[in-house]
Amino acid sequence: MIHPDLQRYLDGEIPRDALPPELSQETGEWEALLASAAELRAERAPAWLEGRVMSTLSAQPAPSLWRTAWGWLLHPQPVRLRPIGVMLAGAAALLLFWIWPGARPPLPGAGAAGPGAAAQFT
């Protein structure tokens, strides 16, 4: 576990002078490690390395059109909706429900008996 003061120093929050003396050796080791990492970061890999690595990878055949389409249908897809589009779709559905015959519930008082049905008043 790293000492909290050393962590704050490595993060740049406090200067080295603010560290306790018992952390000076460990601080030096961390600084040497960071300096060597900076040197390694500046170096580039040889040009032949990419070709060598790519040649070791097996070639993957392209998936068939059916497999791609099936995967697209089975996996969730992002959908973007505009509020005006949702409102227009809702209005169209409401209009279709209103116009469609038999979709509306019967009006109150219009029972199953037709206009010529007998009624008894008491």
Image (cartoon, grey):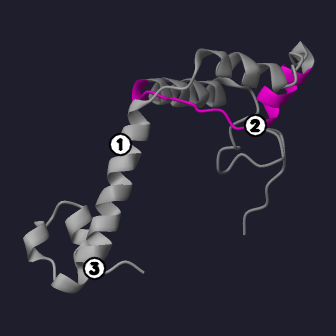
Query: Picture coordinates of residue 43 (x, y %)?
Result: 44, 30
Q: Quadrant of residue 52?
A: top right
Task: Identify the amino acid type marked 1.
Answer: Ala
Mark closer to the observer (2, 1): 1
Which mark is on residue 75?
A: 2
Q: Quadrant of the N terminus?
A: bottom left
Does 64 appear above or below 29?
Answer: above
Q: Secondary structure at mark 1?
A: helix
Q: Left of 4 or right of it: where is 70?
A: right
The answer to if 83 sits in the magenta stretch is yes
Q: CA distance from mark 3 to mark 2?
A: 46 Å
Closest to the observer: 31 or 72? 31
Query: Picture coordinates of residue 107 (x, y %)?
Result: 65, 44
Q: Quadrant of residue 16?
A: bottom left
Range covered by the magenta-colored residues: 67-84
Which mark is on residue 4?
A: 3
Closest to the observer: 97 or 46? 46
Q: Which residue is mark 1?
A: 38
